[in-house]
Amino acid sequence: MLNPKEILTASDDEIADAVQYGNPLVLRGLLYQLTGDESLRDLPVGSVPTGFRGETPAITDDGAIAKVRERAAAYLRNWRDAGAPELQIGPFERLPVAMELALGAAIPEPEREMWIEQLALDPMVRGLDWSRRPDRARLESFHVIVIGAGMSGLNVAAQLKRAGIPFTVLEKNAAVGGTWHENRYPGARVDSPSRTYFNAFSTDFELPGGYCPQHVNERYFNWVADRFDLRDNIAFNTEVRSMQWDEASAMWSVEVQCPNGVQFLHANVVMPCVGFLNRPNVPDIQGAETFAGPQFHTARWPQDLDLSGKRVAVIGSGATSYQMMPVLSKQSAHTTLFMRTPRWCVETPGYLKPFAPQITWLDRNFPFLVNFNRLAASWRARPEALMGQISLDEEGHASADNERMRDYCLGLLQRKFADRQDLLAKMRPELPPMSSRPIVVDSDDNVYDALLHDEVSLVTEPIERITAQGVQTADGSLHEADIIVYATGFRANDYLWPMDIRGLGGRSLADLWSKDGARAYIGTMLPGFPNLFVIYGPNMNPFGTGLSVTDLQEMQTRFALKCIEQLVAGEHRQVDVTHEAYERFNAELDRRHAGMVYTDPRITNYYLNEFGRCTVNSGFDVRLMWNWLRDPSGPADQTSEGWDIARPHFGADLELA
């Protein structure tokens, strides 16, 4: 994203102003890497409070801050005056120290490589570099089908194209973007930092803010499709109906519904990239068919819907409805929120605000600053900073970290509803934070503020039925509405539904999962279903276990590509995971989940399926996941942590044939 022409015309004052907006700690590490200035290592580092997460390292001394900013400004002035030549990052040997200086913390040597990947100096670092050149004819006859052109599918497609592996992406919609194409409801935006939500190859995409709204996210995925020239490989308006493994040919036969009718495609490998938040969950409420006005799920929000003068009923109280309420309360005549269970909200100052212009200027003009900012954002999501929040203590109670989070969230509630004890009582959850996904909210414009409006109502009585005029609750009250919005989430536990998938011997995936729901081996492979790599499959949501969902998807993609390398260059036909390995991995996963707050039996959200099991969240420290998914063809270190749980190597848990 560097723009040398822009820096060439920047004045000294403009540069001096811009560096005031850079994080001094991050600038220190980057400047050390670029210049080797040893005096930067001696600057004092203090800390600043960061809510319930305690203290975060920071340069707080005024003199030290001034020194870093002056060095940063001088570096940019000198680079400008030299004509802004192309720069290299500097000696690789210096990088570990530079990273630690940027973070104000030591990076343990065993995980250093993972954090270097997070820097994204190599934007395709989680792709495939062939260890040996494949036979050209064999490679050209090989084919991969990718299902879905959302976040994970586009990443897979970009990496396949880079590796030269033929592929086709099947997308049920008319455009790319997945969930960010479908979910256009007012207020939709990410709830994790955009610097880490977007891919490692995203450093050239300019971020307008810390938490990007829907239209920016959709624009990003279109940027990916265009940047890597993927559109010719995507079959739009094409939905997979079924898949059947043919043992004789070692190929998948894939039945699709497309504009030309039903067709059958064939592939050596299939990679479903459909996620688990893609099939709307619409409740079956008595009388819904009699309602006189429009009614729809939030993932099917009508284009150009005018809410002015309308009475809107919102059914559901998850992240979607909490995001919508501040917007709907300003656009409609009256908004009624029907809530069964309140959620904890995490106050995040500036959540709705764009970056200051100086921040985006620095992103465009300071070499490698985007990379170091990405590293810093990733470090804030390291396992040590998060896992205490999802854990139970030795007595089975919420941990001290979780209690601190609860107190922080409760503080916002009490402050907003200081004069409305009735709303405070209704909006205060009974279960601890992290028993459901906490909802990131802005300090000054959130669902609590919306509920204080005169034209907003909160209803906690159970819904009895829907009539032509509105929603009737169990107490007999009729809440009149012109529009009903179902903010009722998705069929999150119905992985890969409604596709009918059949593997070896014709066994269905439904049969494999009939005992207690969806499972997978490291979220990626299924025994008896060769050459099937599920990206963002069961138990791959890194909820409180470190890094972002995008990072895990990239790790899975690299793992799958290295398996594909063996099928092409190694001249094997299929790769599968043993059933014993699948059972061993999931037994340990279930054991670890038993120590998490989100498996409380009182939970009624998608974190527990109908069998009382969590099929969504990872449960494993991301450093374990990174190590497991690094290289199935690499040396199998039987002394490595996690070897007793998973041995994802050819000849161990993985079988080639």
Image (cartoon, rainbow, N blue to C red):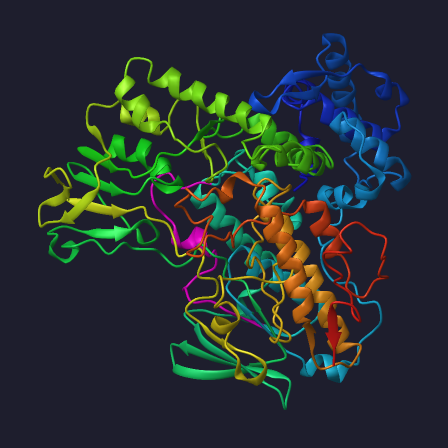
Q: Nearer the viewer, residue 310 or 4?
A: 310
Quadrant of the rendering where the N terminus is positioned: top right
Name the residue at 86% across, 38% down.
Answer: 90
Residue 309 is situated, as x and y percent measured from the top left of the image, at 15, 36
Q: Quadrant of residue 453?
A: top left
Q: Which residues are magenta?
A: 168-189
Q: Quadrant of residue 56?
A: top right
In the rendered image, residue 640 lying in the magenta stretch gets the answer no
In the rendered image, residue 177 lying in the magenta stretch gets the answer yes
Which residue of the protein is positioned furthest toward the front in this rendering?
395
Residue 549 is situated, as x and y percent measured from the top left of the image, at 58, 48
Q: Nearer the viewer, residue 591 or 575?
A: 591
On screen, 640 above or below 235? above
Residue 365 is situated, as x and y percent measured from the top left of the image, at 68, 33
Q: Quadrant of residue 317?
A: top left
Instruction: Tell me the chief SS of the magenta region.
Output: loop
Q: Is residue 482 left or right of residue 573?
A: left
Q: Nearer the viewer, residue 221 or 561?
A: 561
Quadrant of the rendering where the C terminus is positioned: bottom right
Name the residue at 88% across, 24% down.
Answer: 37
